[in-house]
Amino acid sequence: MAAGEVPATEVTAVHVSELADPTMFLDGGELLLTLGLGFQPSAVWFSRYVQRLVSRGIAALAVGLGPEHGSVPVALADAAGRAGLPLLVVPPPTPFLAISRRYWSMIAESGQRELAEMLSAHRSLVAASLSGAPVPSVLRRLAVAIDGWAAHLATDGVLRSVWPADRRGAARELQGAVYRLHAAGAPTSLSLPLGHDDVVVQPIGDHSRLLGYLAVGHRRPMPRHAQQLAMTAVALLTLESIHAGRLRLAARGSEAMVLDLLRAGQAPAARRAAAFLGIDLPDRARVAVVRDGHPEEMLLHLDSAPGAGEHVLLGAQAITGDETGSARTEAACCLLLRDKPGSGGWLRGLIDAVPGSSGVLAAPAGLEHFAESLRRAEAALAGTAPGGCADLGWERTAAPLDTPELRAWAERRLQALAGEDELMATAAAVLRCRSELDAARDLDVHRHTIRNRVTRIESLLGARMDDPDTRSELWLALRLTGRC
């Protein structure tokens, strides 16, 4: 080390000692001050002394000149030079106490600067969360503050946004890890190496609902302040998401009004009401009913579901039946979807993303037939097991024959079979299948059982099942009452 050259070494403390071996009182990183009262005039002694200090990892040795030594011993300087130990001189009349005080004063000033910088960074994140585009703004401010990168990922690990944009490839590599983290159940954080970076992934959301993940990357090792700022960003994004979700649920109330108008057969009024919400209702659409234990949570999940904007026109909690007695589906959501390819697959993906839910998608129909489509979907949903998703799209060509008078007739026509669920199901199967043998396979019973049931149905109805008029009337009555 050249004379006058001072290395950029961090000093952890200032310690004064005249012991020949002060290492038992040192932790490493200290600036050791000494007057050299215990120095021995021996090159071997100085070499061993320096080696003990170096092995302990002190930052530097400072010799105070004055009463004991007018200059630094040459043997000490040689030993320090060979070992690479920074050797400093404290000229008289500088007291060691002045050096200690100055060191701790600098530490305090540094801490205050660090605190001020952290507070400024936190204020910057808060301001970003209140902007018009909170998520990208928070990511950008966070990445700049930590001199790294930040990304927002969906619950399944799909990348939504990242800053800076050139780290998109690195952020996408997290998808598998985040997907496994989400599949594990309880939201938790994750730390992992990624290339030359350390990455921390933290869940966004509260104890009841997971909204996504925040990933923060920094060149290894990740500093503590980066993790602290990431926690602040998670809290801000959680609050913003919950607030936005509540606003969205409030908007769902207006959408429920539009759906209620459609149910009442007021399609023109529904179109005008939807226009106030910025929604242009098409002439044809598809009704979907989704059952879940927490419909509000389902609606909030719907807002973040991939592809929702392409398919969903309106969404609200299930609507009650009208005066004609159509069914009411408790703890369910009613959706109005665009009549476009892929609607069934999209609904299937929504059901798969919410464990325990189930859904039914009605056939495409004009808005004036919304009530009938809803009734059919609700009837089908009643028999759909959790995790199931039925697409009634095969009814595309079915005539919209449904009026209160027809439904009343259907109930009267089936009155003789009221309470006989097995007979109702058998009648539907026989009418739907080509033969009684096919009906037996469909219901998983013996064909003789089907024959006996058909005999009883004919007895109760007073008509033969092989009569075309009876078959037509019975099929229409079963369809109108949602039993097939």
Image (cartoon, rainbow, N blue to C red):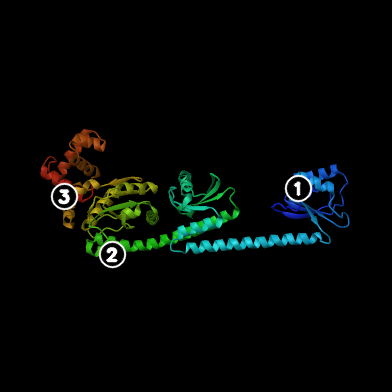
Q: Residues within 10 Å of mark 3 (few under 14, many from 20)?
A: some
The residue indicated by pointer 1 is 85
**Which residue sits at x=37%, y=63%?**
250
Vertical order, 365 against 266 (above or below): above
User: Residue 130's spot in the image, x, y percent?
Assistant: 47, 64
Disc 3 from disc 1: Cα separation: 103 Å
The disc labelled 2 sits on which kind of residue?
Answer: Ala
Earlier sequence position, callout 2 versus callout 3: 2
Earlier sequence position, callout 3 versus callout 1: 1
- Residues at badges 3 and 1 in contact (C-beta under 8 Å)? no
- Residues at badges 2 and 3 in contact (C-beta under 8 Å)? no
**Which residue sits at x=24%, y=65%?**
269
The residue indicated by pointer 3 is 413
Left or right: 103 in relation to 126: right
Q: Tag on residue 400?
A: none
For the residues carrying marks 2 and 3, which lies nearer the camera in this image? 2
Disc 1 from disc 2: Cα separation: 78 Å
Q: Disc 1 on helix, strand or loop?
A: loop
- Residues at badges 1 and 2 in contact (C-beta under 8 Å)? no
Taking the image as drawn, is residue 231 in sight? Answer: no
User: Residue 135's spot in the image, x, y percent?
Assistant: 46, 58
The residue indicated by pointer 2 is 275
* The image quarter in which residue 97 lies: bottom right
Instruction: Name the residue nearer the viewer: 463 or 88.
Output: 88
* The image quarter in which residue 71 lies: bottom right
Left or right: 432 in relation to 110: left
